[in-house]
Image (cartoon, rainbow, N blue to C red):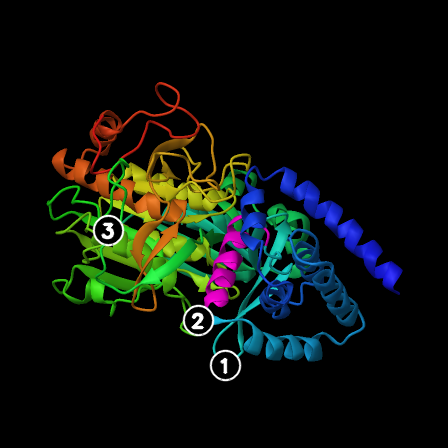
Amino acid sequence: MLVVVFACIYAIGSYLNSRAQSLPESSAVIEYQNGLPAEAIFEQVIENTASSGARAGQADGLVLAGQQTDTPTSSLESVTERLQSDLSGQQQSRREEVQAQNSSSISAVQQEPLQALAQQSQAAGLLPPLPQRLEVTGPDGETVYVEVEVAPGVRTIEREWIMLVTEEQRQQLFIDAPELLPYLSDSTEFGVLNAEVLTFVIPASLDADNAVLELVPENFRTLIDRNHVYQVQNLEERAATPAGTPSVVNEQVSLLTPMSAVCNEPVSIGMIDSAIHNGHAVFRDLVPGRLQIRRFLAPELISPLGHGTAVASVLIGEDPALGPLLPNANVYSATAVHGQDRYRQGATALNLMRALGWLMEQKVSVINISLTGPENRVLKQALDLAMESGVAVVAAAGNHGAHAPPVFPAAYPGVTAVTAVDRQGGIYRWANQGEHIDYAALGVDLPVARDDGRIGSQSGTSLASPIVAAYLACEAAQSSGNIQLAQRQLQARSKDVGEPGHDSIFGYGILHPTIRN
């Protein structure tokens, strides 16, 4: 039996090693594990995977803990023993035993690095993947909808397809595609335009291999797509500090915090994200109406607070450590993100479009979207309509690594794609790269508001994106709403770094209040 176990370990370890080869800085995550107890790492991996039952992910995590850390041989044997126990159907009892051991042997000082390890592993793609089929439930345990993975890294809502049509197109569709009408489950108006989003719930037989397209007239097939799921670009986190404590910076770095205001105009800016802890001290003294929040989730779902709170605090959070960037702005926040597991969150294309429509109605000049996912014909159509109406869209480039393929909406033409840099102007180690990158902004160890009421330093392209959104909103206000002119002025304002001119790492350059071109 033990021989079989070690054979499994060797095979999975070989896979992990090849995976690490494609991640240029995966060694940084491995190094972070050095010195951590193997028991603690084992428990962290099991805790993250138990709810989904992803056994392959569990094995990956166990090999990572046992083979890629500088732990003694006895610790490896301990990990191996746990793997054998799991394979024999005794995982739950063993988890309880490890938890009891951890509670007495791992100090509070050790627990914080473990949390950071989990978040860094997630950014590196080392956490076990979400299950191929995931039931998204409310607090009562009732399933609201089901996510499925239809291709590697591509998630969608099971059997749901969406279409964006004008009133004229809808009438023509009903004439040309009567077989599709019985599956129409919902219709939602899209913003101030003469358009609406149709939702179809189809049988499994039509969902497989895109068979539903056979019911759609050819001239309508570019208007329909799956209801894809877009992932929140989760943040690497450092130790938290009490609210009100100024961040300490080296006097010789160029990108200082707290950041000064980009402009004092009363701009209106939108964001599509998770819920916001609007009772946090950084928002408590805001003039009523400066932060307006609306939900675009099923009432049974709870949206996590952390990500949206951090992004909003970059824009208008009032604290000595933060700034804010836009001291007189009105922020309209559309809550469209649901929880997937303890560390990951997503938003459906349908909810993104509902949020986008509402933000257009609020007449915001710029919309920030710190989520990434696959190409979607319907979402692209909605974004194009929004941008044609004079709204600028800014999106995070993604935290998938330099060699990852482009992600959307950042990679759509017309969308302003933002990457992250550290305080010395170096590129964030997990940032996506590509010719679609437009600008870079500080997104490494950036002070932000946390959902626990404190201020913490976090990293990710999600945090750089609202900085560029703030700049673009200010330029739009100073250009009388002319987004094309605002974009040209923004290019002139950015600090060119890297290769001269536009490049695939930094775009046109860095935007930060303390630097000038």
- Residue at 68% across, 48% down: 209
Residue 352: percent from the left, percent from the top?
Answer: 40, 54
> Does residue 124 lie above or below 413 as drawn?
below
Residue 149: percent from the left, percent from the top?
Answer: 62, 54
* The C terminus, quarter of image: top left
- 110 inside magenta stretch: yes
Residue 13: percent from the left, percent from the top?
Answer: 73, 50
Q: Main secondary structure of the magenta part?
A: helix
The residue nearer to you, when weighing 93 against 283, is 93
* Residue holding disc 1: 140
The residue nearer to you, when weighing 84 against 40, is 40
* Crowd tier of the residue under label 3, counting other residues whose Cα lies within 10 Å: few below 14, some 14–19, many 20 or above: many
Residue range highlighted in magenta: 109-126
Q: CA distance from mark 2 to mark 1?
A: 10 Å
Q: Mark on residue 301? A: 2
Q: Mark on residue 395? A: none
Q: Earlier in the sequence, mark 3 or mark 1?
A: 1
Q: Nearer the viewer, mark 3 or mark 1?
A: 3
Q: Mark on residue 315? A: 3
Q: Amino acid at mark 2?
A: Leu
Residue 438: percent from the left, percent from the top?
Answer: 36, 31
